[in-house]
Image (cartoon, helix red, strand yellow):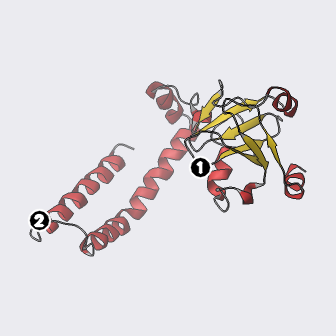
Amino acid sequence: MIHTIVHSVSLQCHMRSNSAGAMLRIAGLEDTMYKGKYDEVNGWGKFYLQKIVNMQVIGVVEGISCPCDELVLMTCEDKKLYAYDGEKMHLVASSFKELSERGLEYPASESYYNGEAFKDMVRSLSDWEAVKVRDVGRKLEEEHQKLVKETKSAFLKSLKSWVSIQPSLDLDPGLKPLCLTAVVEALSLLLIHSVKHS
C-alpha cells in the first residue's frame, strides 16, 4: 500500500528539523541512491531493529547534514518513521502525526547500528560454549568441520593459483614463493587445527 502511494505522489514539503531548510521529497526506493542495492536495503529490516520488519522507503530528506549523500526516510509495520544516514538507522518520529506536528528529530535520541539486532544473542564466550554443547550447536560444528574437510584442497589449490598470477604483488621475485608457501602453510595449519579441535 505504502509502495503504491509513494510511487503515485511526487512532492516536496518543508520539514521542521535541526537543519533549517530541510525538505522532504516523497520518493520510493528507485528514486534514491540505494536503487538496485537490494541486499543493503533488505538489511535495514533485518539487522538494525530487534524484530525483523519490512522497511518501505517513503522519501528522502534533503538539505540536512548527514554522513551520506541522502537521508532516506522509511516506515515499517510499527508505523514509526526511521531515517538511514549511511551508518545508522534513526527513529526520527513515532508516527506520521508526530512528524507533521513536531518535525523530524535527526540525529535522533534513539538510533540503531548494523548488527544491533544480534547484540543480546550471545553475551559471552561461556554463553557460546553452552550453545555449542546443545544439539543445534553440535550440528553446526559438524557441518562446519565437514565443509572445511571437503573444501580444503580446492581452497588451497585456488589460493596457490591466485597468488601465482598476481603480477601486482610488488615483491622481490625471490620472495614470492616464500610468501606463497608461508600463506599456504599458515592456512593449512589453521584448517588442520580447526579439524582437530572439533
Kindly tell me whether residue 166 is visible in this rendering.
Answer: yes
Q: Which residue is mark 2?
A: 175
Q: Which residue is mark 1?
A: 69
Residue sitting at 85 percent across and 32 percent down?
100
Which image quadrant for residue 18?
A: top right
Q: Are marks 1 and 2 in contact (CB under 8 Å)?
A: no
* Residue at far left of view: 174
In the rendering, at what x and y percent does residue 81 appear?
A: 77, 36
Horizontal side of residue 111 vs 168, given as left or right:
right
Identity of the amino acid at label 1? Asp
For the residue pair 2 and 53, the one nearer the viewer reads as 2
Question: Number of labelled discs?
Answer: 2
For the residue pair 144 and 174, the one nearer the viewer reads as 174
Report helix, strand or loop for mark 1: loop
Report helix, strand or loop for mark 2: loop
In the rendering, at what x and y percent does residue 4 appear?
A: 89, 56
Question: Which of the numbered marks, if any, corresponds to residue 77?
Answer: none
In the rendering, at what x and y percent does residue 146 appear?
A: 45, 56
Q: Residues within 10 Å of mark 2 (few under 14, many from 20)?
A: few
Kindly tell me whether residue 50 is visible in this rendering.
Answer: no
Identity of the amino acid at label 2? Leu
**Closer to the N terminus: mark 1 or mark 2?**
1
Q: Residues within 10 Å of mark 1 (few under 14, many from 20)?
A: few
Residue sitting at 47 percent across and 51 percent down?
144
Q: Of discs 1 and 2, which sits in the foreground?
A: 1
Q: Is residue 155 above or below residue 20?
A: below
Q: Name the quarter where the C terminus is drawn.
A: top left
Which image quadrant for residue 94?
A: top right
For the residue pair 191 and 113, the one nearer the viewer reads as 113
